[in-house]
Image (cartoon, rainbow, N blue to C red):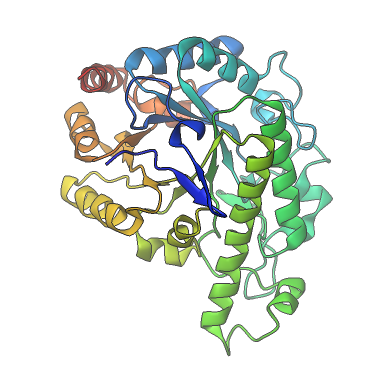
């Protein structure tokens, strides 16, 4: 099966080559996720792109938005605090796009969609969306807004103004940078039961307790509306760019976070789904990727994620890559090259072993 399927919408057929297809010789996506924690300087970004291209990957999913902040010159959101909270003197996304073009690798801007902030310490910049629009944060069944915690505080996709805001951020990015694709992460509700704010309940127009199935469908539909609006925007701003989404690994797990990836595929809203099938059991990995191939067959490209960070040996990483029928995405760069971020650092010996094994695999 060829990975990059044609996109069909409104009776139009767009060739796969026009959808951010990999520049390398293979027609399957051989991708790697590069998190925002892997670079701090322009030299870091140049080295990342060069290393990924030399390894044999043909697609980089390069993270440029983590928590309603920017690793590029956004006209809407503040610079990431990890880069000093101000212009660091270079533009990571511009550098990545330029180097990707030079090396012939496809560069997709990876964005966390719903997260507004991570950690118990609030953002410094008072222009951050957490200060400007605190009422956009999800609300629990107890009527309390989600508070800063060790994980993400998230925006509420049921609010039309939130969807409009996110699309405006992504439009600004897509219009000004020559990206080959836009990769949506956290395009879902976070785990738990959210959002019980007065406006969302009024928009629903019923009691969640009296109509739990309708309540779930309403919130699931709001996420889909955001995907649809992003699709329209990207087609207008950069029609040759691919739209993809990182999704929970199985249909059952996607139901828990109100993520209708199957519906997006059926309606032609995404060009590819990247199920996050990270597992240290080869049997479990095979089972979940087989489910994905069955669910998405003939509808959209299904690119399983290989969680190298869960593997104790390099051989397991390449073994799971080999199980993927039509492309894969490796999570993540810090499993091949020792991360500058101490919280994500793996052993140099294991990273070297993985690099050697992955390089041999990709050279086949």
Q: Residue at x 49, y 57 (%)?
A: 264
Residue 205 relative to residue 246: left or right: right
Please give left or right for residue 133 compared with residue 62 in the image.
Answer: right
Query: In the rendering, at what x and y percent does residue 141 appear?
Result: 62, 75
Q: Residue at x 21, y 54 (%)?
A: 287
Query: In the displayed structure, would residue 315 be above or below residue 258?
Result: above
Query: Image height check: is 24 above or below 140?
Result: above
* Front in this rendered view, residue 46 or 298: 298
Asked if one can make out residue 149 in the rendered structure from this viewpoint, the answer is no
The mark total stands at 0
Task: Left or right? Give the position of 356 relative to 37.
Answer: left
Say which quarter of the image contains residue 83: top right
Residue 15, position as x, y percentages in the image: 46, 37
Q: Quadrant of the C terminus?
A: top left
Q: Is residue 273 left or right of residue 25?
A: right
Image position of 362 with respect to 304: above or below: above
Residue 117, quarter of the rendered image: top right
x and y, in percent, of residue 244 in the image: 49, 43
Q: Is residue 289 above or below residue 192?
A: above
Q: Nearer the viewer, residue 226 or 52?
A: 226
- Name the image quarter holding the N terminus: top left
């Amino acid at each position: 099966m060829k990975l990059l399927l044609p996109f069909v919408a409104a009776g139009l057929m767009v060739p796969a080559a026009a959808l951010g297809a990999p520049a390398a010789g293979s027609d399957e996506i051989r991708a790697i996720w590069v998190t925002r924690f892997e670079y701090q300087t322009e030299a870091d970004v140049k080295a990342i792109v060069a290393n990924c291209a030399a390894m044999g990957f043909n697609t980089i999913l390069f993270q440029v938005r983590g928590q309603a902040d920017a690793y590029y010159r956004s006209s809407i959101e503040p610079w990431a605090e990890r880069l000093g909270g101000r212009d660091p003197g270079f533009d990571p996304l511009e550098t990545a796009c330029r180097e990707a073009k030079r090396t012939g690798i496809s560069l997709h801007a990876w964005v966390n969609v719903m997260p507004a902030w991570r950690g118990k310490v609030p953002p410094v910049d008072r222009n951050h969306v957490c200060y400007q629009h605190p009422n956009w944060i999800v609300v629990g069944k107890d009527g309390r807004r989600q508070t800063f915690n060790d994980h993400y505080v998230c925006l509420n996709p049921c609010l039309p103004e939130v969807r409009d805001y996110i699309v405006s951020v992504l439009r600004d990015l897509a219009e000004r940078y020559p990206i080959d694709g836009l990769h949506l992460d956290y395009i879902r509700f976070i785990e738990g039961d959210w959002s019980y704010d007065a406006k969302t309940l009024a928009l629903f127009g019923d009691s969640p307790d009296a109509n739990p199935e309708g309540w779930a469908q309403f919130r699931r539909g709001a996420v889909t509306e955001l995907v649809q609006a992003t699709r329209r925007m990207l087609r207008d701003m950069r029609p040759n760019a691919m739209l993809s989404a990182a999704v929970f690994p199985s249909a059952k797990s996607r139901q828990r976070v109100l993520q209708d990836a199957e519906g997006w595929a059926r309606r032609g809203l995404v060009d590819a789904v990247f199920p996050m099938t990270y597992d240290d059991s080869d049997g479990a990995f095979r089972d979940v990727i087989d489910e994905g191939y069955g669910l998405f067959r003939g509808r959209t490209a299904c690119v399983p994620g290989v969680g190298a960070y869960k593997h104790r040996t390099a051989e397991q990483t390449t073994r799971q890559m080999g199980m993927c029928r039509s492309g894969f995405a490796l999570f993540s760069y810090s499993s091949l090259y020792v991360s500058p971020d101490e919280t994500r650092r793996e052993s140099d010996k294991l990273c070297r072993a993985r690099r050697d094994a992955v390089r041999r695999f990709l050279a086949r």
